[in-house]
Amino acid sequence: MNVTVNDIQLELYEGARVKDAVFKYYSNQGEALPKVMPVVVDQSGNIIDKDSRLTEGTVLYISLKKPKRSFFRGMFP
């Protein structure tokens, strides 16, 4: 199955998860994996959970920046 991470096409096994794509991306780039799992978003900018399953042709973007916190987050129990 082919997925794209930060404009780089990766070959992953069927049933792979977002975290597998992140590991493969860093491995292919020859970079050390960050200690904290980076934020991963889809083409629409939606944050994707690291345990989400991928499908053929998925496009992801990795960002080391923390997502902006909502004003309302934490205001309600």
Image: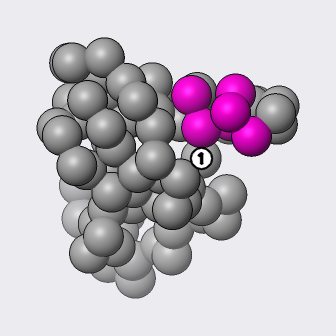
Relative placement, left or right, of 75 versus 65 is left
The residue positioned 23% from the left and 35% from the top of the image is 54
Q: Going by the picture, which residue comes out furthest to the bottom?
A: 71
The residue positioned 21% from the left and 18% from the top of the image is 14
- SS category of the residue bearing label 1: loop
Q: Which of 5 and 11 is in front in this view?
A: 11
Q: Examine the rendered structure and indicate whether residue 62 appears above or below residue 14.
A: below
Quadrant housing residue 30: top right
How crowded pointer 1 is (Cα within 10 Å; few <14, some 14-19, many 20+) is rated as some
Position in image of residue 69 (x %, y %): 47, 73
The answer to whether residue 69 shows anywhere in this view is yes
**What amino acid type should be assigned to the residue bearing mark 1?**
Pro
Asked whether 32 falls inside the magenta stretch, the response is no
Instruction: Identify the image quadrant of the C terminus.
Output: bottom left
Relative placement, left or right, of 60 versus 22 is left
Position in image of residue 4 (x %, y %): 40, 51
Position in image of residue 1 (x %, y %): 26, 29
Residue, disc 1: 38
Q: Nearer the viewer, residue 46 or 27?
A: 27
Position in image of residue 39 (x %, y %): 52, 53
Quadrant housing residue 64: bottom right
Quadrant housing residue 2: top left
The answer to whether residue 52 shows anywhere in this view is no
The residue positioned 53% from the left and 36% from the top of the image is 22
Q: What stretch is highlighted in magenta?
A: 24-29
